[in-house]
Image: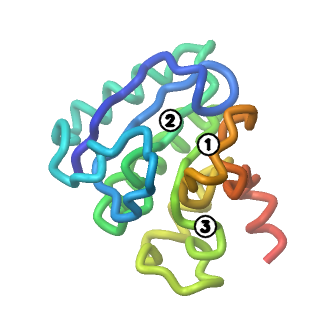
Amino acid sequence: MNYGEIKKVDIANGTGVRVSLFVSGCTHHCKGCFNPETWNFDYGNKYTKETEQSIIDALSPSYIEGLSLLGGEPFEPQNQPTLLGLLKRIRKELPTKNVWCYSGYTFEELSGKKESRAFTENTLEMLSLIDVLVDGEFVEELKDISLKFRGSSNQRIIDVKEELAKE
């Protein structure tokens, strides 16, 4: 997996002060995307064990609330195995940190309720390790800069644990 950027202090992509990982690779190609360079799976830097350790280190201070996964698309099938490993490590080593994930796929697609190319053997476990999912493709015609943590009004902010518990 490649990544485009790691922001070690980010206040725009979730609550509190966060570390944000912008992964590479996205097949949605939303019109008006703020990060189109990350559509390419080869964009940016190779994700390595050193990269992962730098993320863990950046998450460690008490003032950091958690991790945000963005892209590109974290739930592209090619990205899921690497991110699943990172999420497992965070839950084990930093259990008080929360995880936000931004995905163009909907919760229904990721939870297997609706057919999706993103649904793999890793998807449900990865989803279970995420606290908040901002789902749905960015739709330029529904862009609304007054929305908190979303770019367009079709996108939802979902408490993943609560939604999974309903099932």
Q: Mark 1 to mark 3: distance in Å?
A: 15 Å
Q: How many marks?
A: 3
Q: Secondary structure at mark 3?
A: loop
Nearer to me, 121 or 25 = 25
- The colouring scheme, among rainbow, by chain, secondary structure or one colour, is rainbow
Counting from the top left corner in percent of width and height, residue 133 is at: 64, 52
Nearer to me, 140 or 102 = 140
Nearer to me, 96 or 154 = 154
Q: Mark 3 to mark 2: distance in Å?
A: 29 Å
N-terminal of the pair, mark 1 or mark 3, is 3
Residue labelled with disc 2: 93
| Residue found 27% across the figure and 41% down from its top | 3
Counting from the top left corner in percent of width and height, residue 84 is at: 42, 56
Q: Secondary structure at mark 1?
A: loop
Q: Mark 2 to mark 1: distance in Å?
A: 32 Å
Residue labelled with disc 3: 106
N-terminal of the pair, mark 3 or mark 2, is 2
Q: Is the C terminus in the top left, top right, bottom left or bottom right quadrant?
A: bottom right
Camera-nearest label, 3 or 2: 3
Is 127 above or below relative to 24? below
Residue labelled with disc 1: 151
